Every structure is written in structure tokens, then in C-alpha cells.
Amino acid sequence: MISIGSIRYSLNVNIQGQRALDSIETSSNHLFKALIDQETGQRGYNLTKDADFLEPYWQGAKEFSESSEALLQKTKEFPDLHAEAQKIVEKGQYWHDHYGAALVVQTQKGNQPSVQILNEGKKAIDDFRRSTKNFSDKIEGQRSIVRNLMKTRINFTLAALMISIFVIIVIDLLINIKLLKSLIKPIIELSNCVKSYTEHDFSKGIPSYRKNDEMFELIKNVDFMRMELSNSITSLKSQVNIDELTGLYNRRHFNEFIEKEWELAKENSENFSLILFDIDYYKNYNDTYGHLAGDDCLKIISERLQDLNHAPPNCIARYGGEEFGIILLQRTEQEVLALAEEIRNAILDLKIPHQGSPIADYVTISLGAASIKPTGDMKPNEIISMADKALYASKQKGRNQVTYYTKQFSY
């Protein structure tokens, strides 16, 4: 029982460490999104001088400050990550102070920022992006350290367990050879099972053992531990990839999915499509009905997305705020457009009242779609940019419509 307790403790320490790293990664993603929201709002305001773009900018600034404090606080237990987190925060703050806020002020004064300043701001934001990517890699490295520490502890416990068992076997050998044989096999199988469980492989069941003795109790406890850990880890993985409000995949899963499937589409020369859409005048909706009603609106739309008539999308995710991303694999342009129109009509058919919308009595959405066969050094950001431009065009043309990206795109 002491060995089981020691193994359970080691596994629990690993789970706690992994959860702490998941929390750090979540804060890092929030920090990244916050600065990107600032940059998007500042850029939109600079290009259009539309004060509505300042809403995501100021909201991003607030979330950046909160995420910075959370990230620095959570990384205190990991000195290496803490040092990197400080660098990321400093780089993000540098962009905000020298380019974000400065360019907003210039635009407010009616001045057009110089190309040099814009280029310098882009370099600063790119440097921040690289730092956050490197930080994610370091988190993965720290995960390996935590896992290896767990394995070392468990192997030490197993060694102590094996020594104890060996002593018992030697004593029993002098008493009963038959009993020795009946003990060796389940012990070895149990040891192999526990090793598999330390690697998060819970498919291997416990060895069959029929005697009602101490070994039976040991095997039963190990099986109970296996089920508990399997449920905990499965639940943890699900929570990491699911958006808590909408029940759809979150931005983290979206990023992992698009990276993986993009490379497969490139290898197989297959079509890769993306639909981006957001709710028209969502800020007005929140202002009119309140943020709780805004959350309910997102939930209703998310539920409808999971019940589409056409072949289901390969990935539906909450891309950020009121924006959603839908990844489609091996679909034709006609299929992509058909699905986009189905989504637009499906949301309109929900007839969610929207008194704050200047274009309709109900909630509507604007969509941008794009398709491409990835080749060479092309990255997923290219199709994201294409779909984003198409979405922007839908808004420019009056909203509540679908725009498909083409090579002659001028927006």
C-alpha cells in the first residue's frame, strides 16, 4: 500500500505540474491574443479612422495587463519560464508604448504614420510572436522535465517494490515452490502495467488474479488508480481543448489542428479551406441586452453550428470573442460556399432579436471564405489572412453576406 501511495503521489505531482503548465500556457495564449487584439484594433483604426476599432485595442490593453500579471505570478514556480515570461511581457509592453499607443495618438491627431514607423512596429510585433512561440516550446520542455521526474520517482518506487517482493519470494521459495510460481507472473505483469500507466497508456488492463490475498488487494488498488488517473487525464485534455463558454474547440486546438492538417494537405496536394465569420454589430448587442445575453447569443449560435445539414466541418472553433473559424478539408469551392451560405441562413433563421443592428431586426453574421492547395514554404497564416480579408470585404459591402477570396482580391 505504501508503494501504491508513493506511485499515486508521483502521478498526482505530475498531473499538478502539467496542470500548472497548462495554466501558464493558457495565460501565455491570453497574453498573445491580447496584444494581437491591440495590434488589430490599432491597425484598423489607423486604416479606417473608425473609433469602433479602438474597442478591441483598449480591451486588449486591459487584458494584456491582467494576463501579464497572471503569467508572471504562475511562472514563479518555474524559474526558467519566469525569466522568459518577463522577456515576453517586456517585448509586448515595448510594442504598446512605442508603436501601439503612439500610432493611435498620431491617428487621433490626424497624422499618417510613416512607413518606417509602421515597419518598425511590425518588426516589434513579429519579435513578440517569435518569443511567444519559443515560450510554448520551453513549456513543452518543462513538461518533459516534470514527466521524467515522475518516471524517476516511480521507477525508484518500483525498484523498492520489486526488492520487497523479491525478498518475499525468496522466503516463500523455501516454503512452497508452487506459490512462488503463482506470484511471479502477476507481479511482473503488474510492474509492466504500472510502467504503462506512468506513460499515460491506460489501455493495458491489470493481470488476472483469482486468489483472495494481499496480491489481489494490490492489483485491485492499482486498477482503481488506473481508472481514476485515466478519467482525470482524459478530462484534463478535454478541458484544455474546449472553449468553456461555447463548448466548441478553442483557439489552442484550432492552431494545433490547422498546423497538422496543413502539412498533410501539402503532402497529399489536397484542397484546404477556411471560413471565418463574426457576429454583426456584436458590441451593439452587448450594449443593448447586456454581456450575459451576449454570452447566451454565442452559446445559441455555437449549438446551431454543431447541427449543420451538409457534411460536418473538420473543425469548428471559437476563434476569439465573437469570431469563429471553420476548417474544411478536401472540399470544392462550391461546397465551401454552400456551407458558408447555409451557416449564414441558419444563424438568421434563429431569429435572435437585435435592436442595436442597423441592418436587420435579428442577429446576422458576415463570412469570409478561402481555399488553397498548400505548396512549398506556404504557412497556415496565408489562408487565415485570405479568409480574414474576405471577411473584411463582407463587412465593407454591408455585412450579412459571404465573400470568397480570389487572386484579384483588392480589399
Image: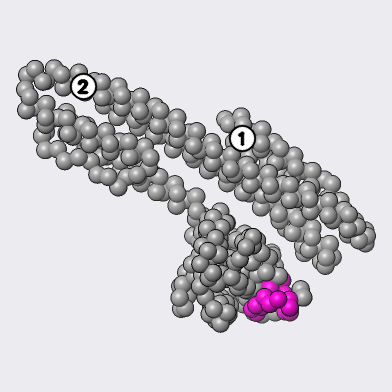
What count of labels does the image hold? 2
**Residue 271 figure quarter:** bottom right
Mark 1: give few (<14), some (14-19) or many (20+) Cα within 10 Å. Answer: many
Amino acid identity at mark 2: Phe
Regarding residue 19, the answer to whether it shows in the image is: yes
Residue placed at 10% from the left, 34% from the top? 211
Quarter of the C terminus within the rendering: bottom right
Residue placed at 75% from the left, 55% from the top? 39
Q: Is residue 92 left or right of residue 338?
A: right
Quarter of the N terminus within the rendering: top left
Placement of 265 over or under 238, stated as above or below: below
Residue 166 - label? 2
Q: Nearer the viewer, residue 368 or 285?
A: 368
* Residue 203 rendering spot, x and y as whole percentages: 30, 47
Q: Magenta part of the protein: which range?
A: 390-409
* Residue 115 rendering spot, x and y as whole percentages: 88, 58
Placement of 329 over or under 259, stated as above or below: below
Amino acid identity at mark 1: Leu
Residue 81 - label? 1
